[in-house]
Image (cartoon, rainbow, N blue to C red):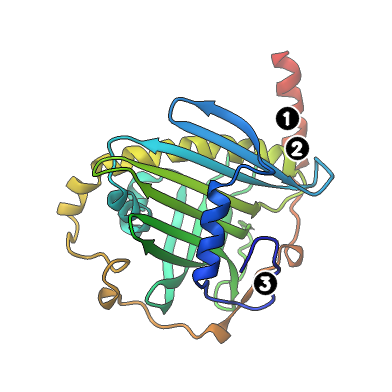
Amino acid sequence: WSRGETIMSVLIPDDRAFSSFKEECGSEEGWSLTYNKTDMTVWTQTIGGDEEKSLHKIKCRMACKDVPAETMYDVLHDIEYRRKWDANVIETFDIGKLTVNADVGYYSWKCPKPLRNRDVITLRSWLPTGSDYIIMNYSVKHAKYPPKKDMVRAVSIQTGYLIQSHGPNHCTLTYLAHVDPKGNTHKTQWRFLRGGRLIAMKKISKACLKYGEWKQRHNPGFKPWLYPEQTTLPTIPLSELSIQHADSLENIDESTLSEMQTREERDSD
């Protein structure tokens, strides 16, 4: 699908969708530069006129000078390794496959108090294109995995990574996210999410440096994202999935967070 296009039914992304995602990763038109230091650059984009309730897009680009693109791709795919390096993960697992390069998975993560923890179910697809790699996802619903009482079900409208190779030991990672975290204090949540994303990007880079050694000790030949014949996941028919629309989920009241943030900002002035 193209940017701004509303998806009414579950679709597996085609070449046009991957091209559109890559184009947006490289474009700066309509984006506001909010952070630019050393190897990290961050842009944001506001969707909607109400600053307090509007959604945002975020784009982070990080230069990784000691990381091959192939390693970055493996680390972002390897769910077992993520459980080791991602301190925010609560639970993550694959639900089933759709095609050789698309699956459905569950991910839940810790949020700073007093925010409630979030979870998401996404249709994920990936595509190596020459020396570049793309992994992207969007939220879907599956009857067997309804929202949990102790979690807020977030919505990925479109989220993904573009990995670009710049030689044998150098790559650039671009993270692009259009997400509705749900809740009624989007602006305040956004401050936490943006800061958390910067930390997460740096953790990914560090995790890449240790991956080779770790993988040698943990099923070194098993990479179903490269060798689809290795997968043991059941095949899910598209008919079991539907689009997760943000407006069908409850907005959780986290206004105490907004009040706390205001006090902190006042105290720091």
Mark closer to the chain start, 2 or 3:
3
**SS label for mark 2:** helix
Determine contact: label 2, label 1, CB under 8 Å. yes
Q: Quarter of the image for the C terminus: give it.
A: top right
Instruction: Say which of 46 and 1 sits in front.
Output: 1
Name the element at disc 3: loop
Along the horizontal axis of the image, is 221 left or right of 191? left
Indicate the amino acid at tag 1: Met
Judging by the rendered image, the residue that carries numbered circle 1 is: 260
Q: CA distance from mark 2 to mark 3?
A: 34 Å
Percent x, y of residue 122:
53, 66
Where is residue 159? Give x, y as percent.
55, 56
Q: Residue at x 52, y 62 (%)?
A: 19
**Residue 1's image quarter?**
bottom right
Reading the image, the residue beneath label 2 is 256
The 10 Å Cα crowd at callout 2, few under 14, some 14 to 19, many 20 or more, is few
Q: For the residue marked with disc 3, what is the amino acid?
A: Ile
Q: Tell me the residue that label 3 is attached to.
A: 7
The x and y percentages for residue 198 are 50, 36
Distance of label 2 from label 1 (alpha carbons):
6 Å
Under tag 1, what secondary structure?
helix
